[in-house]
Image: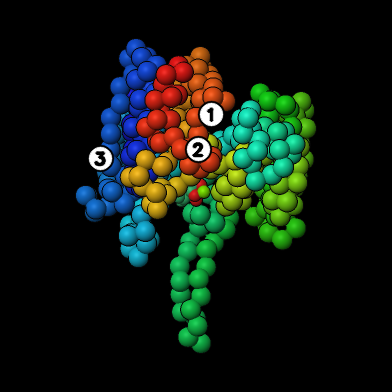
Amino acid sequence: MKIACLAGDGIGPEIMVEAKKVLAALAIDGVTTADADVGGTAYRKHGHPLPPETLALCEASDAILFGAVGDPGCDNLERHLRPEQAILGLRQALTLFANLRPATMFAGLEDLSALRPEVAREIDLLIVRELNGDVYFGEKAIRVLDDGRRQGFDFMSYAEDEVRRIAHVGFRAAQGRKGRLCSVDKANVLETSQLWRDVVIEVSAEYPDVELSHMYVDNAAMQLVRNPGQFDVVVTGNLFGDILSDQASMCVGSIGLLASASLGERQTQYGTLGLYEPIHGSAPDIAGQGKANPMAMILSLAMLLRHSLGLEAEAARVEAAVARALADGVKGADLGGSATCAEIGDAVAARL
Ligand code: IPM
Ligand code: MG
């Protein structure tokens, strides 16, 4: 079982160390890891945020554990050389179109949520975000109009097969949970969303056991803070899913707690090829100070064990160890505590 480890920029390397610590503590037979450069770090060393050797390593692996990319020093580079292009490039090259972003309240953290504890307590949802289409990958440019004004544009589109395959992921996820799927769009304004909604309704015929609802994205943003407990599985496009998943993280208490899996259709010997990363970014302001919370990274490792290596029992053990550490009061600065990144990793490993 081969895991490619791409630590990346900012806090990426320090949280990766802690995830590897937890992996080592599990002592699973036959797992190997290999490191490769990505993001701004890779640009500085190799002149490209996603060097060919990094992509080759990922293609030859069963799973990819990904830290974070983003480096303010690279913000003025041409767009195709910016660190973010590494993660977008990997999602595209490996056709990782389904992004699973679970948000569940941890017992004892209700007071840290941006919401009232009695509202926060009910959070147990999964955002299924499409990752290969939408305004992210359409034609884009800043051009000069005939009258000399500059205009920026980004082409938003979804083809029906792209909507269909992510809809299936959403429905199947709902079947494995509470049986409710909420499709989020902006069909009152966007044609892209109208097609999205039409296709989701078509696909729903194959899932009579799932209760389907639709919500406009503005309303969804509001409902997510008014009553997040109403959601089971949310399926949505690339841009809306990006925004709503960050919002969901603060409902849970910290963006340092939310993991994600990006999956496609490629099967490996042990499960589905996938990329696993915290939903937070590289946090350059706190990089290298031991202040990062590695829990999202460690929970991403748990998702990797489950989806790509078929190791459900080990995945559940890691998740239980994180929950236990939190319940025991092991908290980083993001949660109002003082545990360092390494101490949090040690605490989780000890609880395994
Ligand atoms: C995420 C991030 C990325 C995205 C960035 C880094 C390109 O915000 O994974 O949510 O927008 O998808
Ligand atoms: Mg994001």
Q: Which residue is tagged 3? A: 53
In-front residue for pair 160/262: 262
Q: Residue furthest left?
A: 45
- Where does the image place residue 227, in percent across and percent down from the top left? 76, 42
What's the residue type where badge 3 is placed? Answer: Glu
Q: How many numbered discs?
A: 3
Whether ligand 2 has any atom under 8 Å from the Cβ at mark 2 is answered as no
Q: CA distance from mark 1 to mark 2?
A: 8 Å
Q: Which residue is tagged 1? A: 329
- Residue 260 visible at all: no
What's the residue type where badge 2 is placed? Answer: Gly
Q: CA distance from mark 3 to mark 1?
A: 41 Å
Q: Which residue is tagged 2? A: 337
Q: Residues within 10 Å of mark 1 (few under 14, many from 20)?
A: some
- Where does the image place residue 39, in percent across and percent down from the top left? 33, 48
Specify which label sits upstream in the sequence, 3 or 1. 3
Dot 3 lies on which element? Answer: helix
